[in-house]
Image: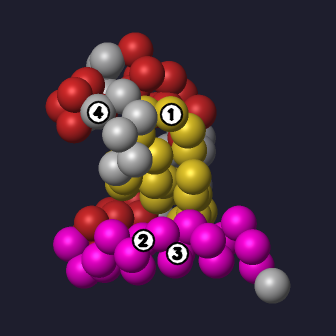
Amino acid sequence: MNNKYYVYILLTENNTLYCGYTDNVEKRFKEHLSGKGAKYTRANKPVKIVYTQEFLSKSDAQKEEYRIKHKLTRSQKFELIKAQNNPN
């Protein structure tokens, strides 16, 4: 049984961001690519995973997803991505 959950951010073809949570990032990304993911990613084709963060509980992952989606501005989301990809 998987005890890890992840928040992820996808970059789409039209340079928008999509945030979600899952227990398997690669599987979920493939679902988005195949058109079986979220309604948003059916209309805005994902290009790549640009951010992931691991959590030990589903609840914590959901809370962080909510925070990213509803509390951060677009520029703050890009800063979050940048900070993970360039930790120094």
Is disc 2 in contact with disc 1, using a CB cutoff of under 8 Å? no
User: Tag 4's secondary structure?
Assistant: loop
Q: Which of the 4 image quarters holds residue 88?
A: bottom right
Q: CA distance from mark 1 to mark 3?
A: 18 Å
Instruction: Look at mark 3 in the image and give the residue it sits on.
Output: 80
Q: CA distance from mark 2 to mark 1?
A: 17 Å
Instruction: Look at the picture and state if 17 lies above or below 57.
Output: above
Screen quadrant of the N terminus: top right
Residue 87 lies, in percent from the top left, at 76, 79
Magenta stretch: includes residue 75: yes
Is disc 2 in contact with disc 3, using a CB cutoff of under 8 Å? yes
85 or 31, nearer to the observer: 85
Amino acid type, mark 2: Lys
Residue 85 lies, in percent from the top left, at 71, 66
Instruction: Look at mark 1 in the image and give the residue it sits on.
Output: 47
For residue 44, which numbered disc appears in the image? 4
Highlighted range, magenta: 70-87
Magenta stretch: includes residue 59: no
